[in-house]
Image (cartoon, helix red, strand yellow):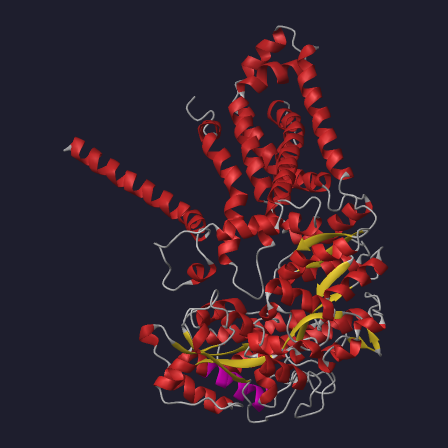
Amino acid sequence: MAVKTKTSTRIGVTILGWGIAVWLFFPIFWMFLTSFKNEIQAISTPPKLFFMPTLSSYAEVFERASYWHFTLNTVIVSVGATAIAIALAVPAAYSMAFLPSSRTRSTLLWMLSTRMLPPVGVLVPIYLLARNTHLLDTCTGLAIVDMLTNLPIIVWMLYTFFREVPAPILEAGRMDGASRWQEMTMVLLPLALPGIASTALLSLILCWNEAFWSLNLTSSHAAPLTAFIASFSSPEGLFFGKLSAASTLAVAPILVFGWISQKQLVRGLTFGAVK
Amino acid sequence: MSRLKTPRTALYALTMLLSGSALSSASGAGTLTIATVNNGDMIVMRQLSREFEKAHPDIHLNWVTLEENVLRQRVTTDIAMKTGQFDVVTIGNYEVPIWAKQNWLAEIKPDAAYDTSDILPTVRDSLTVDGKLYALPFYAESVMTYYRKDLFQKAGLTMPEAPTYEQIRQFADKISDKTNQVYGICLRGKPGWGENMAYVSSLANTFGAQWFDMSWKPTMTSDAWKSALNWYVSAMKADGPPGATSNGFNENLALFASGHCGIWIDSTVAGGLLFDPKQSQVADKVGFASAPKGPYGKGPTWLWSWSLAVPVSSHQSADAQTFITWATSKDYVKLVAAQKGWVAAPPGTRASTYAAPEYLKAAPFASFVLNAIKTADPNGPTAQPRPYTGAQFVAIPEFQAIGTQVGQTVAATLSDQMTVDQALASAQSSITRALRQSGRAR
């Protein structure tokens, strides 16, 4: 009886898991499917599941816009913003996890509160700052803003991971004569590497998909893939096929990257949970 | 020590990468940055602009294609803050008079060969402020009625050349077949000043309604507004498609093109799309008529033109004017005809386009569109004197916010969240508040 219940529970959980996975993946699947339809098929009611696929939308997208230029900008901005954010967040999280003061907790909460502000609230000051520092429409400007936007969540994640590292291990390092820098780079970082990797991956995904600042701070030279997608929306005319093709091209690299590194990501996110 | 080498090298590489990308962003001299939308005619312009670059090797074109609302926001920010990111901007005849009065736009002075007198007078006037031209029209549109000839024939109906709203409602009732997903009438329902309110404002005009009286007091609770909105809500509930509050121009275009609408009242620019078999399943079944008239019959009429203007913040004003005169010239129309066919010629701007027999042959709706645009009068008389101009919009800066807010209350009537009376009362108070805050009304 116990075995029977266990089996039926397992089947139920499996079905539920697959159901949620299909539900989450369906928009991406439909976007992928629509990208191979012509504009008439893309808008047909009821929607067509079976049709003669065409690459015409992709051909038009490649003809109209320089996909590689947008992709390169996205890679530069995402990698740049993530690298700077990790470089700043590691010492910050280290200090908060291992050298806490009476204000650490409130500082952490304050950092997180900046994520609760709607970005449009600070659009004008950020735009003016970017203009006055000649950083409008540059990868540097966008990378800095993306980095600052994601920094609170990165510090929080790293802080959580670092707290899972037993303090006696660091103390042992100190007993052996390690300086603070050596303690952080030679003892802590190797131990927390899965957590750092998954944090970096999350930051990369957030930067890749960031649209608000990309659309407002860039125009042509530094425009990333989110601007590339937006340029295929049209106020007058059919565009769903081309928009789907552009979106598929934009999400493909990060999706593939996510699939490849999902083991690392899951390992990182559950870091410390099984100790 | 060697352990520090790798992070330092990485940091150095990162700095070089980012600074390199920063340096590369500086535009070279002779590069024009053009902000535009992703409409079919603009896509053709972008493709054919290679010819311009060939003829002007010292001018390089850099295109920024943005979604319509993002474009407005970006261009407004750019001009207001004098950033100078854009040398040519694509704007409508709503923005031109407002921005010209703010001294945001450079005056355009085309040479004699450009033949300004060939531009349709209504379109030219909508881009002129105090006798000065501030933008050149790329294409223009008014409003007309599209209908399915086969459905009318089946129901034994004949669409008059100039129908009334009363007739439209009767026709819609008769041809509606909701069980087979054929909806008698499709109208804009998506909230927004340029979406549902473009249509609803035009509807209200012909019912004798207007937005403001001479003291800038809103008149939303007038009987004329009630009649107009009651017609709209009643027709859409009886014969419209489900989920109409999600339908703007594109969604209705998709519905009509895929055979789900019997009547559609919208922009004349849809003609080229509905008659194109590549984009429409009903290309051989489309009929057209004038925009319907309401009880008032007169009133300002819909006119919109997508135009090219040069912001005063541009550092290359002369080159920018050279480009916009090329892109809106008679020669450009001929170039489009030669490369893409006459049907792709930008509509609604030049009399010479409509004088070309090839165009009239390729676009069966051409003379109809010409008449709609020639007779369009955004300054037409309302039932009572009014302090503003515009037909499907009110030409004041506050209208984007007001129109969108009222658009949301109008949409709420379609989804049964509000009655017509409640929606109009709510609109009245929200507009009063907005104009008081802006200082336009006391």
Residue B238 visible in the shown view: no
User: In this orientation, which residue lies closer to the viewer: B361 or A163?
Assistant: B361
User: In this orientation, which residue lies closer to the viewer: B424 or B297?
Assistant: B297
What residue lies at 72% left-to-right and 87% top-to-bottom? B386
User: x%, y% of residue B55?
Assistant: 78, 56
- Number of marks drawn: 0
Drawn side of residue B216 relative to residue B410, left or right: right
User: x%, y% of residue B167?
Assistant: 46, 91
Residue that extends furthest to the left in the rendered view of this protein: A1
Q: Quadrant of the C terminus of chain A?
A: top left
When the figure is inspected, residue A135 is found, relative to residue B380, above or below; the finding is above
Quarter holding residue A169: top right
Specify start and end residues of the magenta stretch as a single range: B221-234
Main SS category, magenta section: helix
When the figure is inspected, residue B155 is found, relative to residue A136, above or below; the finding is below
Residue B112 visible in the shown view: yes
User: In this orientation, which residue lies closer to the viewer: B99 or B328?
Assistant: B328
When the figure is inspected, residue B2 is found, relative to residue B397, above or below; the finding is above
What residue lies at 47% left-to-right and 87% top-to-bottom? B168
Q: Quadrant of the N terminus of chain A?
A: top left
User: x%, y% of residue B163?
Assistant: 51, 90
Drawn side of residue A191 relative to residue B438, left or right: left
What residue lies at 43% left-to-right and 90% top-to-bottom? B158
When the figure is inspected, residue B38 is found, relative to residue B195, above or below; the finding is above
Drawn side of residue B432 relative to residue A47, left or right: right
Is residue B228 on the magenta stretch? yes
Residue that extends furthest to the top in the rendered view of this protein: A176
Is residue A173 on the magenta stretch? no
User: x%, y% of residue A252?
Assistant: 50, 41
